[in-house]
Amino acid sequence: MIDFFSDKFGYILNIIYEIVNNYGLAIILFSVLLKLLLLPLTIKQQKTFKKSQKLQGKLKEIQDKYSNNPEKLNQEMMDLYRREKLSPFSGCLSSIIQIILLLAMFYLVSKPLTYMKKVEQSQINDFKDIIAEEQGENSINTMYPEISIIKYINNKINFDNVENVEKVEENTNIVESSEENADIEKENIIEEDLYINMNFLGLDLSLIPKDNYNNWRVFIIPLLYIISSSISIKITTLQTKKNNENKEENKEAEPDMTTQMNKSMTWMMPILAVSVSLIAPLGLALYWLVNNILMIIEKIFIDKFIIPKEEEENA
């Protein structure tokens, strides 16, 4: 299933890349597009979360009343959820989607030639053999071989292209070299098809922080992600406090499954993302950073405009 999403995301990302011709900018625009597509679901999840918080008092009463009768307790709780048209498992959907997106994007940035450029595995293996022959086996990253190929192709196009052009020009008047010229031209076309411009604001998004710890710039994006995560968690905490103001019954109520799941994911996802971003190409950290910034804007927008309007209509 993750392969399916990575493949579709890669197709969309490549379309955007072909327009902007920059991997970093393509990831940013892709993130915005994905957020817009998921906005209706996010709004629905936020409404569900707010509604579940308001049920805490009633849930507490049921828990106290039927504490010695687990069967009756479960029945009454399900009846309450049914009357309020709220699923006790609704919070799980948001968490599942986040995990799927995390894994799908990890696969995508790890194998951009497979998922973004749709390169056949045989061709990838051919390039691995070429790199191993020219630079040695150790020059290929065993965890991210496609990143090694992209670096090889980028370097070859950036630094060797002039030499290839001169070689072709020298042989243009030699009939016997026509076949060689055709091979050179064919090789250049193949390499250009696989070329991905990874340079974004002076950062090489193919770099992996754990393999480049001497280069302080590789930690800029992960650090910004940590800062944005702290802001996001702070906003979520303030929103929760605001929702529980003047609601004494909620202070003693046990959080329901939706609340617990959202609270857990608030902390778990940033910790997991930071850990993975240190061992993955910087393109993944950039996606999470942009996604976090968009999430902050999204939270503020929904809490300021959507939720108050919903409460006003239901009043």
Image (spheres, helix red, strand yellow):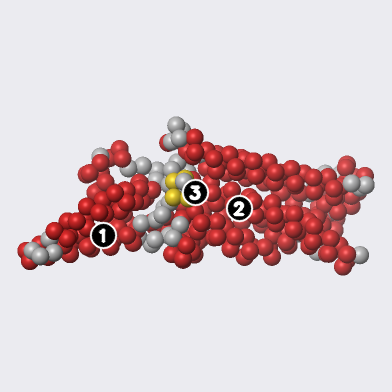
In front: 43, or 300? 300
Q: Which mark is residue 291?
A: 2
SS type, badge 2: helix
Residue 302 quadrant: bottom right
Label placed on residue 201? 3
Disc 3 or disc 2, which is closer to the eye? 3
**What is the number of the mark on residue 188?**
1
Q: Which residue sits at x=93%, y=47%?
A: 246
Mark 3 vs mark 2, CA separation in Å: 18 Å
In what element is the residue under mark 3? loop
**Few, some or many C-alpha atoms within 10 Å of disc 2 (few <14, some 14-19, many ≥20)?**
many
Where residue 1 sits in the image (x, y, percent)?
A: 51, 59
On screen, residue 286 above or below 116: above
Identify the element where label 1 is drawn.
helix
Residue 92 spot, x, y in % from top left: 68, 54
Whether residue 281 is visible to the viewer of this picture, yes or no, is no
Residues at marks 3 and 2 touching, judged by CB atoms closer than 8 Å? no
Badge 1 or badge 3: first in the primary sequence: 1
